[in-house]
Image (cartoon, rainbow, N blue to C red):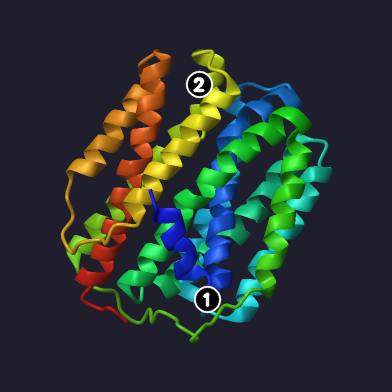
Amino acid sequence: MFSPIRLWFAVASDEDLGLLAGALVVAVLFSATPFFIPAVADEFGITLGAAGLYATVQVGGFALAAFYAGRRLETSHRLFIGAVAAAVGANILSAMADELWPLLVFRFVAGVGAGLITWLAWAKGMRTAGATRKVAAVGPLGALVGAPVSAWLISRHGLDAMFILLAVINAPIAFLPATFTGYRVSRHHVSPSRSNVVLLGGVGLLILSASALFVQTAAIGERVLGLDPLVVSAGFCVNALAGLAAASRPAPSTVASWPALAIGVCAAAVAWSGVGWLWFVAIVAWGGFFWLTVPRLLRAVALWSLVPE
């Protein structure tokens, strides 16, 4: 119940407030994606499946940027400013796009900026358990705010208004404090930890599969089950609250399998239940189980690595 208040006091005087704010805005970006999909389909007269390309290219840019940065780039304030500038510019250009293909290009660039910001936040946050919890907690906090705002703004004022809002909330991040130590991973050798290979593979499959369905959950609720958009946005809000409570918990050194299995059960209920109230319950539980699982997995990767540097 008091997780948002505790988080605020934790970050109010934080020297890395810029990184936490960046991770927060990235969470707002991705929490808005499920509401963008039906709107993109209507705007350009395409199917929901084709509109899913919006999420595909955005997440693709995010994944490629984070993957490349972790192997080739060094954390720096210049890189942070560049990532924020890319996000602001891409959102402004997205609002100006009147065809689908340039919009997809701009969303890819926005994904790249979001991926770099997230990598910088986690590269710093993974150093200590307390920082890890703070970075993890801003994700569901961003969804808590982003879901209802995006649902209302897109339904009332269209895609362009949400793109402008994303640009506006990204811009001030560049002026917030963010410290870097020039951290860079040496790639002359690779950790022989087989457990980490399994964990990272599992995290990848979990996030890819969850994202593929999650971006369509708003369309399922509105178009398939006939739920009111306000009810759908309420489901995302409570989903975020459950995730915030879960992410604020200390991540133990051991990894339990039951939360990951519960994510699969929730995903199946969202996709196939065909019942409005069950969709709502499943989407809420999904948030708690997801953020109970991912920080634990990432913390285990850091603790079990045979080459921690």
Amino acid carrying mark 2 in the image: Gly
Residue 77 position within the rendered picture, expressed as x and y whole percent measured from the top left: 61, 80
Dot 2 or dot 1: first in sequence order is 1
Residue 14 position within the rendered picture, expressed as x and y whole percent measured from the top left: 50, 76
Instruction: Report the residue at 49% width, 51% height from top.
Output: 141
Q: Quadrant of residue 37?
A: top right
Q: Please state, as top left, top right, bottom left or bottom right, where the C terminus lies in the image.
A: bottom left
Query: 301 above or below 139?
Result: below
Mark 1 secondary-structure assignment: loop
Compare residues 189 and 261 and report the one nearer the observer.
Answer: 261
Instruction: Point out the residue furthest to the bottom here.
Output: 181
Q: Which residue is mark 2?
A: 221
Q: Is residue 146 left or right of residue 281?
A: right
Compare residues 97 and 80 and report the one nearer the observer.
Answer: 80
Query: Does the CB distance between marks 2 and 1 fall below 8 Å?
Result: no
Residue 129 position within the rendered picture, expressed as x and y whole percent measured from the top left: 31, 70
Amino acid carrying mark 1 in the image: Ser
Compare residues 305 and 297 and report the one nearer the observer.
Answer: 297
Q: Which residue is mark 1?
A: 13
Query: 275 above or below 294?
Result: above
Mark 2–mark 1 Cα distance, whole angstroms, equals 40 Å
Instruction: Report the residue at 61% width, 73% height from top.
Output: 80
Instruction: Report the residue at 25% width, 73% height from top.
Output: 191
